[in-house]
Amino acid sequence: MAKSQMTFNKKEREKKRQQTRQDKEQKKEDRKAQSKGTSLEDMMAYVDDNGNITSTPPDPTKKRVIKQENIQIGIAKQLPADPALAIRTGTVTFFNESKGYGFIKDHQTQESLFVHVTGLAHQVKEKDKVTFEVGSGPKGPTAVHVKLAEGGK
């Protein structure tokens, strides 16, 4: 008489696989049975005037009409800046001609701004009075369109 080809370990693994399959089927049937009891109306939630979530729908007589033009998404539109205010005055505190950069101290804000030789309209040196505009550089605000001020020294 021939012995069975399946070992004890194989039989146990097969039983375990069958058991997990049955458990999965049972869970699937349970989910189907539970979901049939709930309707769409039971799952709906509403937000009242105070922002609280409720199960009662809002009163249609208290409905407010909002015009589409009044809805603001993002940042409010800003008026264009006055070009006269964009031009500032300052003093060159440091400038290295060989490396092509320096710093300007703004008279209005007293902050030191970086200036590169590409942002210069005229040659400048230390302690020159200049007019400039503030632009943005890779590491923060920079002075651009730098010109000598009238009576610039």
Image (cartoon, rainbow, N blue to C red):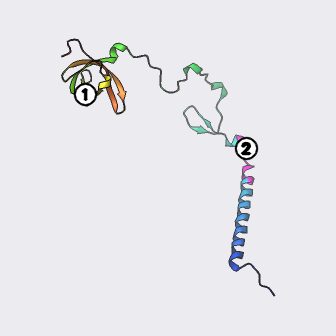
Evaluate whether residue 110 shows in this view: no
**Label 2 amino acid?**
Ser
Can you give x and y, in whole percent of width and height, for residue 30 in the image?
Answer: 72, 57
**Label 1 amino acid?**
Phe
| Front residue of this view, candidates 29 and 101 | 101
Can you give x and y, in whole percent of width and height, for residue 84 in the image?
Answer: 34, 13
Location of mark 2 (residue): 39
**Callout count:** 2
Residue 114 colored in magenta in the image: no
Q: Is 24 situated above or below 131? A: below
The C terminus appears in which quarter of the rendering? top left
Q: Is 120 situated above or below 22? A: above
| Front residue of this view, candidates 38 and 91 | 91
Can you give x and y, in whole percent of width and height, for residue 50 in the image?
Answer: 54, 33
Give the magenta part as a residue range: 32-40
Location of mark 1 (residue): 103
For image coordinates 36% across by 27% down, the residue present is 136
For image coordinates 65% across by 37% down, the residue present is 56
Observer-side mark, 1 or 2, equals: 1
Q: Residue furthest top?
A: 150
The N terminus appears in which quarter of the rendering? bottom right
User: Tag 1: Cα neighbours inside 10 Å, few (<14), some, or many (≥20)?
Assistant: many
| Front residue of this view, candidates 82 and 56 | 82
Query: Reading the chain from its start, which is encountered first: label 1 or label 2?
Result: 2
Residue 9 position by quadrant = bottom right
Q: Is residue 36 left or right of residue 50?
A: right
Q: Secondary structure at mark 2?
A: loop
Q: Are marks 1 and 2 in contact (CB under 8 Å)?
A: no
For image coordinates 64% across by 32% down, the residue present is 58
Q: Residue furthest front?
A: 98
Cα–Cα span, label 1 and label 2: 70 Å
